[in-house]
């Protein structure tokens, strides 16, 4: 039967033998040539699979102790790694950075920089939380809300009165680049710059058109914060806050509760508060809360001794290992989302109890403090040797583009690091990029995931990607802080 526009259907039987012997041989040869790459590919997969692993937990996490105390000589645990004088210098630098927003007379970031942050999203509108592409109206509405034609329409010192987030634009909604590309979908919200703890000093430079969002400058960056999370800090509060005596949190997820039993906000590692006095089992500290006019005022509360220390805490192996272990296994949080930490915020918060200030992102942590030692043109073998010989355990940061880790020292013949990592880059037999998700803070060697069947040795190997290390103290004395940059 004929169908309009169609060719007549011919019944054929795949791989059927034809009358001609020559034709049959030719047909089989064609089939063989077509199938050969698949057969060889399958054989390669079988051979490779016999030499690699695809377990749920990578080998480093199974073989290396996830306890920071295991990586140093216990008899040396109380030895000072920084002299009292050196640590005092670093602590003074920390305080200058921390309170710097309160000593500004005008914004550090100009209108052009803030406009550039907004307009760069016009090149890629990205996707929302529903995995659907943003409409151009999405950016138009944010442009209107930002009201940057009136920038700066504010200019006063403030303080956060809740745990909040610094957002790139005045919205809590996300911007994902591409859900189909590894590292470009969830959880990588491009509008999330950083979490910002309660009671962080800020400079308020601008308020959105509807008043719902406030643009603030903190000691580590710029971002939009919900206006409800900000209060004005008057001169009296600022004087009381800058007394020079502080406590630092050493445990996460602690509740700040006033003497009437009212919950105020969460506090955790990375936060400091002014010290009032010490009791038998607690410290009395100041916190700032907002009044009905959005002005900040002080309240005195108690925090348990087991969760807080006088800043700066002596920089010993025992002390820093104790804080590291508080972070061990904590979920990865891009930009501090969901109250979690990414690689750079993990290290930034880790050093706060010791009065050592670090910038917020990995690039500036490596290049903005201490001395950066580049690994240009070094082989992985030479990199290993340089880290082991020149790196100071617990005071050296290892940097690769987009990632940072703390060097712990040598273990089983290789450098060991503490870091918070999302995943390990993989590549399958067809060259498609993927991720083996780790998703938490951990101690590993410098080749985590090397046993994976689809491990990418070029871009997935940590040591291969490390481009240098930052020494936080002088390599000559091991005690003197390097100049603050």
Image (spheres, rainbow, N blue to C red):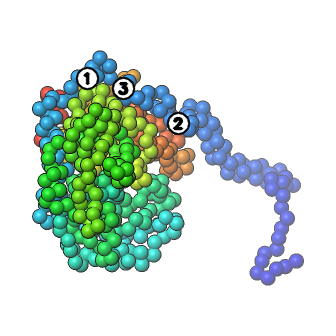
- For the residues labelled 2 and 3, say whether their Cβ atoms are less than 8 Å apart: no
Residue 418, position as x, y percentages in the image: 36, 35
Q: Residue at x 27, y 20 (%)?
A: 76
Residue 358, position as x, y percentages in the image: 24, 45
Mark 2 or mark 1: whose residue is earlier in sequence: 2
- Compute the Cα span from label 2 to label 1: 33 Å
User: 324 and 130: which one is in front?
Assistant: 324
Position of residue 335 relative to residue 310, above or below, is below
In the visual, does 97 lie left or right of 430? left
In the visual, does 6 lie left or right of 58? right
Residue 378, position as x, y percentages in the image: 29, 36
Q: Residue at x 55, y 33 (%)?
A: 52
Mark 2 or mark 3: whose residue is earlier in sequence: 2
Label 3 belongs to which residue?
A: 69
Residue farthest toward the top in the current orientation of the protein: 75
In the visual, does 304 lie left or right of 437? left
Mark nearer the viewer, 3 or 1:
1
- Element class at badge 2: loop
* Res 10 → quadrant: bottom right
Position of residue 149 relative to residue 34, above or below, is below
């Amino acid at each position: 039967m004929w169908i309009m526009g169609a060719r007549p259907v011919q019944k054929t039987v795949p791989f059927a033998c034809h009358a001609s012997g020559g034709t049959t041989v030719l047909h089989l040869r064609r089939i063989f040539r077509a199938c050969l790459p698949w057969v060889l590919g399958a054989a390669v997969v079988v051979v490779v699979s016999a030499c690699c692993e695809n377990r749920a937990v990578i080998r480093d996490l199974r073989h290396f102790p996830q306890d920071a105390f295991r990586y140093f000589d216990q008899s040396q645990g109380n030895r000072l790694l920084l002299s009292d004088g050196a640590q005092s210098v670093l602590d003074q630098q920390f305080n200058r950075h921390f309170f710097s927003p309160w000593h500004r007379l005008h914004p550090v970031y100009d209108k052009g920089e803030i406009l550039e942050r907004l307009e760069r999203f016009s090149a890629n509108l990205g996707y929302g939380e529903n995995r659907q592409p943003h409409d151009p109206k999405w950016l138009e509405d944010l442009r209107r809300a930002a009201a940057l034609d009136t920038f700066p329409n504010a200019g006063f010192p403030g303080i956060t009165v809740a745990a909040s987030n610094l957002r790139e634009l005045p919205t809590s909604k996300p911007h994902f680049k591409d859900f189909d590309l590894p590292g470009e979908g969830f959880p990588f919200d491009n509008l999330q710059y950083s979490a910002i703890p309660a009671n962080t000093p800020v400079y308020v430079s601008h308020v959105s058109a509807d008043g719902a969002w406030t643009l603030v400058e903190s000691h580590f960056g710029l971002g939009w914060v919900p206006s409800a999370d900000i209060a004005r800090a008057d001169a009296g509060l600022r004087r009381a806050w800058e007394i020079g005596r502080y406590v630092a949190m050493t445990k996460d997820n602690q509740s700040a509760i006033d003497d009437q039993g009212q919950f105020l906000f969460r506090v955790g590692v990375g936060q400091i508060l002014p010290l009032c006095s010490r009791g038998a089992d607690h410290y009395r500290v100041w916190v700032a809360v907002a009044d009905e006019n959005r002005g900040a005022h002080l309240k005195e509360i108690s925090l348990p001794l087991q969760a807080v220390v006088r800043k700066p805490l002596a920089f010993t192996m025992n002390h820093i290992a104790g804080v590291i272990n508080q972070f061990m296994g904590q979920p990865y949080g891009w930009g501090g989302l969901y109250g979690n930490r990414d690689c750079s915020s993990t290290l930034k918060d880790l050093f706060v109890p010791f009065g050592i200030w670090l910038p917020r992102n990995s690039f500036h942590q490596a290049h903005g403090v201490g001395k950066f030692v580049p690994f240009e043109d070094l082989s992985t073998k030479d990199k290993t040797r340089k880290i082991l010989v020149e790196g100071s355990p617990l005071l050296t940061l290892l940097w690769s583009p987009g990632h940072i880790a703390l060097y712990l020292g040598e273990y089983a013949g290789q450098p060991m690091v503490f870091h918070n990592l999302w995943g390990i880059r993989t590549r399958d037999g067809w060259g498609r990029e993927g991720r083996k998700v780790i998703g938490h803070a951990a101690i590993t060697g410098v080749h985590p995931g090397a046993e994976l069947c689809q491990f990418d040795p070029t871009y997935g190997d940590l040591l291969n990607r490390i481009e240098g290390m930052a020494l936080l103290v002088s390599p000559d004395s091991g005690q003197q802080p390097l100049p603050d940059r």
